Amino acid sequence: MNKQFRKIAVLTSGGDAPGMNACVRAVTRAALSRGLEVIGFYGGYSGLLNNKMKTLNHGDVSNIVNEGGTFLYTDRCLEFKTEEGMKKAIACCRDNGIDGIVCIGGDGTFRGATDLSNHGIPTIGLTGSIDNDITASDYTIGFDTAMNTVCVMIDRLRDTCESHARCNVVEVMGRDCGEIALRTGIACGAVAVAIPEIPFDETAAFEKIKTLRAGGKRNFIVTVSEGLGKYGEELAKKIEEATGVETKFARLAHVCRGGRPTLRDRLTAAEMGTMAVELMLEGKSNLVVVEREGKLVTCDINYSHIVDRMYKNKLKEGDLDPYSAEEIASMKELCAYRKAEIERLYAMVGDLA
Ligand code: ADP
């Protein structure tokens, strides 16, 4: 063990996700087991700016492995992005003898983690996001719980749709990522799914609903990702007009974020939390722990940002300059794989409806 390494901090930042508590617990207990001290910052990066923190001992993370939300709270802290804010954050780490920080959150959180590591504070990022929107990772903590929550809600809507012979358009979370809408759409037998990644064929959806209604089908579910803005509400009206099937709109919104984490999210939180502590003790920094084909591996945070931008067609000039031809090829391969997966699943919706 690195003798200099005495004290680590942990924080949760950005949008909350079920399993964040289990992850904080894992980081804390794994660190304590290895003889480290642990500090929990409250409210994400705002805790660093306002000195809001607590020493975490074994009992401080008791009874949270199964709790939704995050007991360390989370915040969207704009001041942290400023030079002044960063100075305060670094001073807070120095004053409190913090040797490294585990940052649990999404893409924005990882940018903050990079800034800290660039200023000499080692950071490890863990993916806590219900959206499954980190391109470098197959999975983010909270995704499974959110999808299970959505399934329960849609099953209820289906019951009442069947009674009344209705259609229900259901908007689910996913900032600019359609993963929740797509996978729950399949799992809940949706007749159509609208996501930002793939153009929605309205005419085909209307025709399908009309044909199925003519064949006697009473209930219809359409899932829509929030990433499409107000489209879900519009689509409900259009379906009713075009098909004559009475259509309701439901926005599940923050319901998707709450609830006790599933087994999948608890296990991933435990694995990732433990790995983050091990990486810190190995002297690693500016890495994010990602899942690839069922295994946890690490990826440079900058690489993760760039591959995200590549996937979303938002690359800026010079973004790829630091990378070798092989690295760029591997980024392209990853983006192509993600896109192909989405297209494969999307086609399945049509086949199974
Ligand atoms: P998420 O981590 O879920 O993507 P946000 O985008 O809200 O959520 O980011 C969480 C926090 O991370 C922000 O409130 C801010 O403190 C920090 N952050 C976000 N973007 C940046 C950035 N470009 N540079 C530094 N810090 C950032």
Image: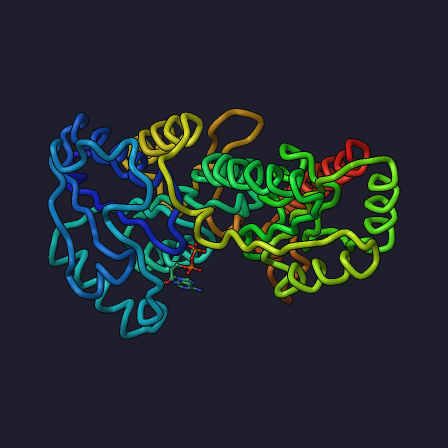
Give the quadrant of the C terminus: top right
**Residue 285 pos. (x, y %):** 36, 44
In front of the other: 228 or 213: 213
Residue that appears at 25% across and 69% down: 87
Residue 138 in picture, x, y percent from top left? 56, 36
Q: Is residue 270 above or below residue 44?
A: above
Q: In this rendering, would 52 be left or right of 274?
A: left
Q: 310 or 74, which lies in front? A: 74
* Residue 48 visible at all: yes
Tell me if residue 129 comes above or below residue 46 in the rendering. Answer: above
The residue shown at (48%, 41%) is 146
Q: In what quadrant does ligand 1 lie? A: bottom left
Q: Locate residue 146 relative to residue 28 in the image: left or right.
A: right
Measured from the top left, where is residue 90 in percent x and y? 23, 61
* Residue 89 horizontal/vertical position (percent): 23, 63
Drawn side of residue 49 relative to residue 126, left or right? left
Q: Quadrant of the N terminus?
A: top left
Is the residue 298 above or below the residue 176 in the image? above
Tell me what residue is drawn at x 86 percent, y 46 percent.
Answer: 210
